């Protein structure tokens, strides 16, 4: 049975366990079937052959400075690896096709809008919009833990103001440059999306734009 599940036309995801600072937070990979080939966003530990039935694998994207652990095998399988600013220095063992550090500049085609964020130096997250499905792809910009998450995760995230629902955490509140974050959130809020696929927690199928604004209400 394929670990991939379809979220929308041309949008598939796969989930895997993942621990961060001792907590089970899970992680999610998204595969977008684009006109130019398959884009693997935030790869997990999975045989690249697993996605061959979806199309021609073309690009693999490490979407921030924390989500890069499993890029290697996908790059070794012949996919172009792309990175946020600072990652090639951190992962000198990997050969990247390039760094995505300019708004709107990327190799993935017209179906994708991309914003390299500068507000949080811990992550330098690349935020993507898949226009055809009106889906926003994020890694650690927001989380969406539900009651099905382990109680230790829920308790810890509640203490960090990251639970319940679509939320940021105290890491973002205290680590982000608020002025730059406001500018970036303004850009993202003007994109046309309803769904949010995040790396940690449940996929938010509807109401994503309102949920994102609410998660960052502390920026106002």
Image (cartoon, helix red, strand yellow):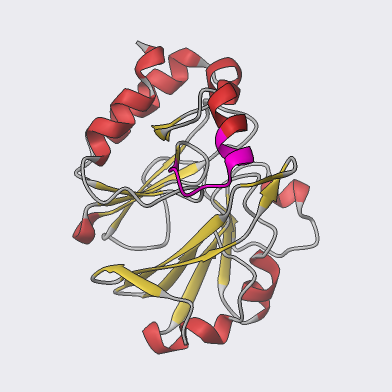
Identify which residue is drawn at 65% across, 65% down: 71
Question: Which is more toward the observer, 173 or 16?
Answer: 16
Going by the picture, which residue comes out furthest to the right?
93
Q: Is residue 146 magenta?
A: yes
Question: Which is more toward the observer, 30 or 84?
Answer: 30
The spot of residue 204 in percent (x, y) is 31, 48
Identify which residue is drawn at 57% across, 28% down: 120
Q: Is residue 215 magenta?
A: no
Going by the picture, which residue comes out furthest to the top?
220
Q: Is residue 162 above or below residue 81?
A: above
Q: Is residue 44 above or below residue 113?
A: below
Report the number of numbered marks: 0
The spot of residue 35 in percent (x, y) is 29, 74
The spot of residue 169 in percent (x, y) is 53, 26
In the image, which residues are magenta? 145-154
The spot of residue 206 in percent (x, y) is 21, 47
Instruction: Give the left or right position of residue 144, taking residue 196 as reference.
Output: right
User: In what quadrant of the picture does the C terminus appear?
Assistant: top left
Quadrant hosting residue 164: top left
Instruction: Give the left or right position of residue 147, taking residue 18 as reference.
Output: left
Instruction: Give the left or right position of residue 119, taking residue 22 as reference.
Output: left
Q: Is residue 85 above or below residue 106?
A: above
């Amino acid at each position: 049975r394929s670990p991939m599940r379809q979220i929308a036309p041309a949008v598939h995801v796969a989930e895997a366990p993942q621990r961060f600072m001792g907590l089970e937070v899970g992680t999610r990979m998204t595969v977008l079937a684009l006109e130019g080939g398959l884009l693997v966003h935030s790869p997990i530990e999975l045989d690249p052959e697993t996605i061959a039935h979806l199309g021609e694998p073309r690009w693999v994207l490490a979407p921030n400075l924390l989500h890069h652990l499993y890029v290697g095998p996908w790059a070794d399988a012949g996919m172009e690896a792309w990175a946020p600013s600072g990652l090639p220095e951190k992962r000198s063992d990997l050969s990247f096709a390039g760094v995505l550090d300019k708004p709107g500049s990327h190799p993935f085609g017209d179906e994708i809008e991309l914003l390299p964020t500068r507000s949080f130096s811990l992550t330098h997250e690349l935020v993507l919009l898949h226009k055809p499905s009106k889906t926003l792809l994020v890694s650690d910009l927001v989380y969406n833990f539900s009651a099905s998450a382990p109680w230790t995760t829920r308790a810890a995230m509640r203490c960090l103001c990251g639970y319940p629902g679509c939320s940021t955490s105290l890491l973002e509140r205290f680590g982000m440059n608020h002025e730059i974050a406001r500018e970036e959130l303004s850009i993202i809020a003007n994109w046309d999306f309803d769904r949010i696929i995040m790396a940690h927690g449940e996929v938010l199928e509807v109401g994503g734009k309102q949920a994102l604004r609410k998660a960052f209400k502390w920026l106002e």
